[in-house]
Image (cartoon, rainbow, N blue to C red):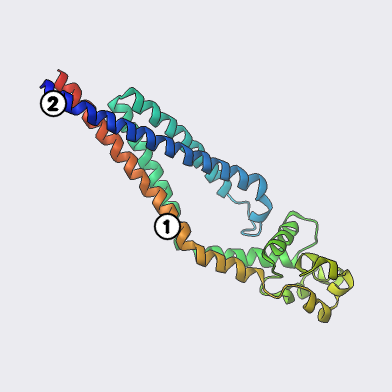
Amino acid sequence: MALRRMETKPVIFCLKTLLLLYSFIFWVTGVVLLSVGLWWKFMLGPYTLLISSDPSNGPYMLTGTGAAIVLFGLFGCFATCRGRPWMLKMYAVFLSLVFMTELIAAISGFVFRHEIKGTFLTAYSDAVMTYDGRSDRSLAVDGVQRRLHCCGVYNYTSWFSSVYFPAGGVPASCCVSFSDCSSADLKNVTVAARKVHRQGCYELVTSFIESNMGIIAGVTFGIAFSQLIGMSLACCLSRFINANQYEMV
């Protein structure tokens, strides 16, 4: 019996070490998600208006999930150090909840990617049509056009039917070279065609979504299924601790 206890203790030590390492990595992913959620909320807020006309719940979901993972990660480290089987089982339950949440989010994003593109088309077209150069959505449109070097929804002609064009022409954010792009040029349909970017923003954004959706889905699924490792380690450690306690009795 003493020999069996001596054989069990190294296994428990190895499992504790692995679970502590996993819990730390799990905690770091929570910090990353929490940071991304806050960054999305405070830095990318206006851009979310181009994805949907309604306020997005995405940053709140990321922030909430990140905060929960941070707490679960800390609890996992505490449960591992204490070595209480009931704590380890509770930690495994927490990990299973996180696993299900991430899995549902990944599947939903992949399945409804076409609906996301359709919503973006509607919201972005409306932002172009009602552009005034001052509102949050208008500034977000300018930001997208500058960063992606694009113009309009499908191309620069999208601006011709906007409420802004009669007075302001095509927005300066469409210009290939700001130094060679006067307001008079932007009001002239013929001249503006030579001064602005030809490619539309919708095509660039949707092509980015299509080309990177597989990578995004793969990373999300990988992170989700990594919870299975933590669940297995927590359950195995709980079982070995129970077995060791039974042998001592």
Q: Image point 39% across, 29% down: which residue?
A: 77
Instruction: Tell me if 229 is positioned left or right of 188 in this view.
Output: left
Decide: few, some or many residues near mark 2? Use Cα within 10 Å; few <14, some 14-19, many ≥20. Answer: few
> Which amino acid lies under the numbered mark 1 shown in the image of this protein?
Gly
Q: Image point 30% across, 35% down: which residue?
A: 234
Residue farthest toward the bottom in the current orientation of the protein: 190
Instruction: Tell me if 76 is positioned left or right of 198 in this view.
Output: left
Residue 84: x and y, percent? 30, 24
Q: Nearer the viewer, residue 51 or 25?
A: 25
Residue 181 appears in the rendering = no
Q: Image point 52% across, 38% down: which residue?
A: 31
Q: Which residue is mark 1?
A: 218
Decide: few, some or many residues near mark 1? Use Cα within 10 Å; few <14, some 14-19, many ≥20. Answer: few
Label located before the other in sequence (2 or 1) = 2
Check residue 4 in the rendering and tell me which mark sits there, or answer none.
Answer: 2
Image quarter in which the N terminus is found: top left
Image quarter in which the C terminus is found: top left
Residue 36 appears in the rendering = yes
Q: Secondary structure at mark 1?
A: helix
Q: Secondary structure at mark 2?
A: helix
